[in-house]
Amino acid sequence: MYTLNFSKMKTKLNSILTFGLVAVFVLAMVAFTVPQDKWVVPEKYKNMENEFAGADEDGIGEELYDQHCKSCHGKEGFGDGSKAKELETEMKDLTSEEVQAQTDGELYYKSIIGRDEMPNFEKKIDDEEDRWMVINYVRTLAE
């Protein structure tokens, strides 16, 4: 005849629960240390040509940067704007090689289309040339 040994069952159940709790803890720690998803830019934008490339001669790009970007990205683009600390997203240093190595189209997509905490500026900056002037100004930040 088979008898139930509640003591062994209780020990096994405690072991399973302990293992489960440790597994949940480890998964939670991994989830909070995984870097932000890579920002994938569609090919259409990657290869987009800046028809207005060059200097921001009339200062429109700088003016729009000051109005829309400076509060997060900072006056000189270092990512140290007054609102930067309030955001969950780490601010990129716009003067860095990583940012400056991107194509104008990639910068356009990230700056104008946006995602997550980076807002969309298609309505706020509705003139196409003005949008490109912002990109041209961002290029000057590395100088």
Image (cartoon, rainbow, N blue to C red):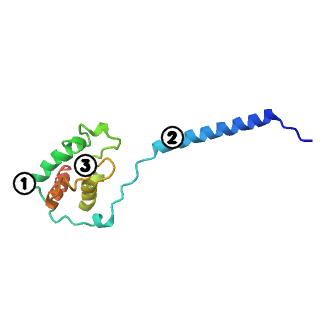
Image coords of residue 44 (percent x, y): 29, 67
Disc 3 versus disc 2: nearer the observer: 2
| Pointer 1 residue | 58
- Looking at the rendered structure, the kind of residue marked 2 is Met
| SS assignment at label 3 | loop
Q: Which mark is residue 37?
A: none
**Earlier sequence position, callout 1 versus callout 3:** 1
Residue that label 3 marks: 94
Instruction: Locate residue 114, reporting x and y percent.
Output: 29, 53
Q: Nearer the viewer, residue 141 or 39?
A: 39
- Residue lying furthest right: 1
Helix, strand or loop at label 1? It is: loop
Mark 2 lies on residue: 29
Residue 19 placed where, x, y %?
A: 65, 39
Return the disc, 3 or 2, that comes first in the chain's sequence: 2
- In this view, 130 is above or below 75: below
